[in-house]
Image (tube, helix red, strand yellow):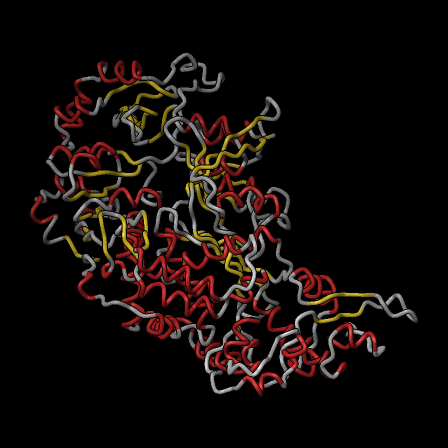
Amino acid sequence: MLVKEYLKNKNIPFKEHYGELIVPCLFNGCDDDSRTGEGHLYFSAETGQYDCKKCGAKGNLVTLAKFLNDDDFLRQAAGDNQPLPQNQSKIRNKKFNSDLVERCHKQMPERIRHYLNSRGISNEIIIKYKIGYGKFYNTNYITIPIQNTSGDNIFLKLRQDPQDGDDKKVYPCGEAQIYGYDTLEENNEYVVICEGELDRLTLISKGIPAITSTAGALTFKDHWINGLAKFKKVYVCLDVDKAGKEGTEMIIRKMEVLSKTEIFKITLPDELGEKGDVTDYFIKFGGTIEDLFGKYCQLTKSVINIDEFHPITVEELISILDLSIKKDDTNKVITFLGLLSAYTEESQFNISFNAPSSSGKTFIPLEISNLFPEVDRIELSSCSPTAFFHDHNVIDDQGNFIVDLSRKILIFLDQPNNELLVKLRPLFSHDKKTLVSKITNNSQKTGLKVKEIHMIGYPSVVFCTANLNIDEQESTRFFVLSPETDSEKIGLGMKQVIKRAIDVEAYKNWVNSQPERQQLIKRILAIRSESINDIKIDKAAAKEIEEKFMNGIKSLQPRHQRDIKKFISLIKALALLNLWWRDQNGQTITANADDVNMAFNIWQKISKSQELGLPPYLLKFYNEVIIPAWEEKSGGLTTEEAIASEIYGLTRQEISQKHMSVYDRLINENTLRIQILPSLATAGLIEQQKNNPNDKRVSYVYPCLLPAKNEAVNWAMNNNSVEGLDEFTSEEFAKSSAYNDGLDTKDDGKTALEYISEIF
């Protein structure tokens, strides 16, 4: 479909200027404040590709149709054999199908055959690929049938009769495709990515396996890259012009994820001129195949040698991540492992960073995600369900809308839209590999239509939000984390900010040039290329999991079924990190006791907050603000004892004052009232009562779990650990307020370690 016609059908006003159609930006409101008739979104009248000169939005008619929810056009683009609009009177009865391809092929004039031969395309290739000739849009074109992955013809790529011009179009319409799926199936050795269908046919005629995008140099899609992983070598040979040079760099950058493939860049000689291509190289320049793959060829990426790697410990991983993230050791390790778990079939796990603003909750996942390939990352600030499904879908050979999130890293920089969250929950829970959602589309002239979306899992997901209220459904599906906010971490962070501010580019180059960071990036790419499907656990390790996890639980709750899955997720991610030193059978590896021990050391540091379903920030708030404030007010009495002594609980004002004295900063009253206190109450750490007979308006806060006065016991609770307390005797422990919690402290020789283990 012509872009002019499409814009007219959609009632989008435009003005034409030197082969371009100019309209007000449709995407980001760039022209809301522009003068009447002024626009910054430019369409090519020939190709339909657009570019906004303000916001940088780029695409073609297919991406525009996705934005406008134009399902009819998208199905046409996917090859549903739809006729052209009725106002194309000359061709309105010409349906696209295999018969049309055959008719065009048979009616090719001899002079067109000679023209193709002069471009180096053999008769054998013309016959094999059904190259033809026909009249479309009232103009004569050479026809090139384009196939999908199943080998079915889905549209024609049209190239104007060279006697009439050099116009290019598609019929009836079509999204960018790989032209050459058959070549991808035929060999595993090497392939050339070129620019243009006729260039591809020229290379094929010379026995060189080649593919191209049907929509130009800058349209090579991310999800095509994985189809190239089978090749030992990939060569990129695009045109000499600016678009070709930019496309070459873009494709090479995307292919960096292919750790087992050598990537080569072919730079055609300058003598070909600004618009020279590989056909000109052979026909006009008289170039040879030997020089193409020798003199003009440059290796840009070698195969990653896994012999360079060694088994890596958690401590080594922390040291590498410390280059750009100071402190937050547990948070950055779990985040790294979470993103790494994306490269499995179904062992991914999810993370939610919950903390006040300016605490670094988005910095950690974004900084770590920079280690991972760009093609695997989806980063969103906010998004509605409809926008999410339209922006990330492709259309399969059956015309279904597919949102493929498998082995992807999905980072929400803020809490996602509630409706989107509801639709994605089954995916987060790994309930089913493929989920079907139905959404309505009211953009069609026929009224409301239902669109069926197939979502394929599983991704690794990270949420970052300042909202401290966590739905129980999310807390059981996610590792709930909070960045550290102590003064030492803040000081180190400020030094990093200063280093970065002095020269951002130099700072990035320094970080990325560190050998250990480069080695970790290579390791990630190598792990990705292994395509691990399953991670098992050996029997000895499984027994150790049960012992370590169950020993720390006083009373089993339903949520522990989810928590043990989190623990196991850490184990599997650590096994994946060291997969070359684990038992491997095909695409399955087996975790061992080393992975269990490393995972347990991590789990111990977060298990208390995970069990309570609280962000660590709130547990720290409870231990460092509420408990000390209560002890100061009540002298360490229990709730019942305090009420009997007419000592009422803490008011919000008293809590705010204590927060100020501890952290030297104010706390937002609404955050305390609406988020913090209700969350602590839900976790069972506090009660809120209006029990003052003299003033029923005031709500008092009473802590439900009182730590022992003994300094060692306080340390144990605050650090969620009993390590290092063996020297404290039962006599000392009996003097603490833990005695008041009902412990029988007989003189039985028990250490404080044993008692504290029973409580915490």
Residue at 57% in and 81% down: 713
Q: Is residue 426 left or right of residue 699?
A: left
Who is closer to the viewer here, 240 or 737? 737
Who is closer to the viewer here, 184 or 196? 184
Residue extending furthest top? Answer: 93
User: Dividing the image into 4 quarters, which one contains the N terminus?
Assistant: top left
Who is closer to the viewer here, 48 or 672? 672
Q: Is residue 382 visible?
A: yes
Residue at 54% in and 45% down: 425
Residue at 42% in and 46% down: 458
User: Dividing the image into 4 quarters, which one contains the C terminus?
Assistant: bottom right
The answer to whether residue 497 is above or below residue 277 is: below
Q: Is residue 264 visible?
A: no
Q: Is residue 456 left or right of residue 637?
A: left
The answer to whether residue 16 is above or below residue 151 is: below
Quarter of the image holding residue 735?
Answer: bottom right
State the image coordinates of residue 128 (x, y, percent, origin top left).
Answer: 17, 23
The answer to whether residue 174 is above or below residue 381 is: above
Residue extending furthest right? Answer: 694
Who is closer to the viewer here, 420 or 540? 540
Residue at 39% in and 35% down: 47
State the image coordinates of residue 336 (x, y, percent, origin top left).
Answer: 40, 63
State the image coordinates of residue 608 (x, y, percent, origin top left).
Answer: 54, 67
The answer to whether residue 678 is above or below residue 589 is: below
